Image: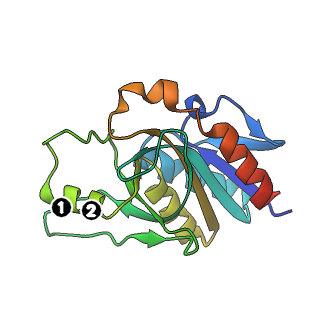
């Protein structure tokens, strides 16, 4: 079995400290926490593969509780034409695109820039960590898999109640694909 590093943003999404005896490492919520802590964990444990899992919001057709394998991460950075970040394809077999942002996405908000809205329309789901985790894995030359379960559909008011709904489904997928 490969040396697997399991990373999750917060224990609120799953409520456990390990998965089938493999420790779950909390990297924190948001892009900065995820990048710094994922890199720190990679350097400490030198894993063969990193598996990120946790909740997400659906911006397309997924329903609360659906578990989705992500293959591409898109950054929400809007440099007003001064800089752009290309999407990171870390698993070409998984066709789902995830938009990573540092705040909860609210589908009815009119406070987003045109560029932000154009980028999010190219994606299926939204989260707050995978782009940064993917950057860390890319720099450190590590394989990455990402599984997200839908906790909201652009209305994050029920996030806490829905955050752990897909965890049991994820555990079965993890067992089938990685153990």
Image-based side of 26 in relation to 155, left or right: right
Q: Please name the residue shown 41% across and 26% down the image.
A: 158
Q: Quadrant of the N terminus?
A: bottom right
Q: Please name the residue shown 16% across and 48% down the image.
A: 112
* C-alpha span from label 2 to label 1: 6 Å
Colour scheme = rainbow
- Give the residue number, with chain letter if any, for mark 1: 115
Q: Quadrant for residue 17, please give it.
A: top right
Vertical position of residue 80 compared to residue 152: above or below: below
Q: Quadrant for residue 154, please give it.
A: top left
Q: Please name the residue shown 27% across and 60% down the image.
A: 121
Percent coordinates x, y for residue 13 in the rendering: 57, 33
Vertical position of residue 168 compared to residue 31: above or below: above
| Residue closer to the observer: 13 or 24 | 13
Q: Marks 2 and 1: CB-CB under 8 Å?
A: yes
- Give the residue number, with chain letter if any, for mark 2: 119
Count of marks, rendered view: 2
How many C-alpha atoms fall within 10 Å of the one at disc 2: few (<14), some, or many (≥20)?
some
Q: Please name the residue shown 44% across and 30% down the image.
A: 159
SS at mark 1 in the image = helix
Q: Quadrant of the C terminus?
A: bottom right
| Residue closer to the observer: 166 or 73 | 166
| Residue closer to the observer: 14 or 140 | 14
Percent coordinates x, y for residue 10 in the rendering: 55, 35
Image-based side of 88 in relation to 85, left or right: right
| Residue closer to the observer: 125 or 48 | 125
Percent coordinates x, y for residue 148 in the rendering: 54, 49
Q: Quadrant for residue 171, please give it.
A: top right
SS at mark 2 in the image = helix
How many C-alpha atoms fall within 10 Å of the one at disc 1: few (<14), some, or many (≥20)?
some
Percent coordinates x, y for residue 47 in the rendering: 73, 61
Mark seen at residue 60: none
């Amino acid at each position: 079995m490969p040396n697997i590093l399991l990373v999750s943003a917060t224990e609120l999404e799953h409520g456990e400290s390990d998965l089938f005896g493999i420790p779950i490492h909390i990297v924190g919520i948001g892009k900065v926490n995820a990048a710094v802590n994922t890199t720190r964990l990679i350097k400490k444990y030198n894993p063969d593969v990193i598996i990120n899992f946790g909740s997400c919001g659906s911006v397309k057709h997924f329903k609360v509780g659906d578990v989705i394998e992500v293959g591409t991460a898109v950054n929400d950075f809007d440099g007003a034409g001064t800089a752009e970040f290309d999407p990171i394809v870390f698993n070409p077999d998984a066709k789902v695109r995830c938009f990573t942002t540092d705040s909860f996405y609210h589908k009815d908000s009119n406070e987003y820039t045109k560029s932000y809205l154009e980028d999010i329309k190219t994606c299926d789901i939204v989260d707050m960590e995978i782009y940064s985790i993917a950057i860390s894995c890319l720099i450190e030359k590590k394989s990455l898999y990402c599984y997200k379960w839908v906790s909201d559909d652009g209305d994050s008011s029920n996030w806490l109640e829905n955050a752990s709904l897909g965890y049991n489904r994820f555990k079965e997928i993890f067992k089938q694909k990685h153990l």
